[in-house]
Image (cartoon, rainbow, N blue to C red):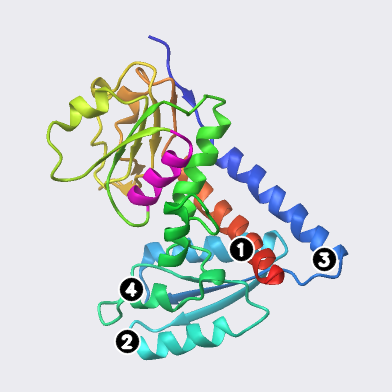
Amino acid sequence: MSTAKLIDGKAIAALVIEEVKIAVAERKSKGLPRPGLAVICVGDDPASAVYVRNKRKRTEEVGMLSVSHDLPKETDEQTLLALIDKLNGDEAVHGILVQLPLPPQINAERVIERIHPKKDVDGFHPYNVGRLVLRMPTLRPCTPFGCMRLLKETGEALAGKHAVIIGQSNIVGRPMALELLIARCTITVCHSKTYDLPKLIGAADIVVAGMGKPRFVQGEWLKPGAIVIDVGINRLDDGKLCGDVDFDSAKERASWITPVPGGVGPMTIATLLANTLEAAKWQESA
């Protein structure tokens, strides 16, 4: 059986970033302010520090204003909410991102809801999620929206395909289901209580894996010719990264597959920048 074609997330993300960079330059030539992104990081989680550093670097590369707020892990909720209120009122800041996870003394849901919907570039605010439910999307959750761009780049028609999403998180699983519904897929959302998961995966034309278990999805479970989007990123004991799909066995059965690293990950940051540009446009049109 032939090996699956790779969906090159790094290359596609580079295209998105270049599109954003050109749009930012056009704004500048018209005398419009450059989009501003404020990233708040609370604590010293090593993985969060890497993500935040990459986000800030990319923001500056496309010509946007990058605003950084690094707070100690002892920061209380009221201090964080007060900072968000300040940024909500700052006209130079078009997007606000609070890096998750947050320390236990801070309620993440309260923080997400405090960000103004028009500055919610993560796409997590109930207003923006509700718009996605109603097929009237504004700012969309970055990882699922990035996955949709990856699917589009395959050139495969999505309408009518059966998509199985493994994982029901608010960050990936649920909004991914909504995105695929908008694309006219038939969807099945699976989770830890799902019966006979391999059978469901075996019926899927598209598999989106995002449950956080290294190499959990086996190639033999896949329907021949399935498209596989691996959202998982897991660090093994030897320091190597792998996804939630067993790549070596899956690539022998799938038609398209995302690698880890180099698949979905780069698209999340690229989509964040695209969302920041959209947020600036939305705020100016009000």
Q: Secondary structure at mark 2?
A: loop
**Residue type pointed to by label 4:** Ala
* 30 within the magenta span: no
How far from the left and from the top, in percent, is residue 138?
55, 58
**Horizontal side of residue 128 vs 232, given as left or right:** right
Residue 274, position as x, y percentages in the image: 62, 55
First in sequence, mark 3 or 4: give its number: 3
How many numbered marks are there? 4
Region in magenta? 172-184
- At horizontal 54% and vertical 27% (from top left) the residue drawn is 154
Q: CA distance from mark 1 to mark 3?
A: 15 Å
Hey, what amino acid is under mark 1?
Thr
Of circles 1 and 2, which is in front? 1
Question: In this rendering, does residue 52 appear at all?
Answer: yes
Which mark is drawn over residue 28?
3
Q: Which residue is mark 4?
A: 108
Q: Which residue was labeled with disc 1? A: 276
Q: Earlier in the sequence, mark 1 or mark 3?
A: 3
- Residue drawn where x is 68% and y is 79% of the image: 92
Q: Measure the C-alpha gap from mark 3 to mark 4.
A: 35 Å
Which one is in front, 192 or 237? 192
What x and y, as percent, mark residue 263? 47, 40
Q: Establish if 165 lies above or below 272.
A: above
Q: Earlier in the sequence, mark 4 or mark 1?
A: 4
Label 3 CA crowd tier, 10 Å (few <14, some 14–19, many 20+): some
Instruction: Provide the residue designation for mark 2.
Output: 74
Mark 4 → mark 1, Cα distance in angstroms: 21 Å
Q: Mark 2 Cα within 10 Å, few/some/many (few <14, many 20+)? A: few
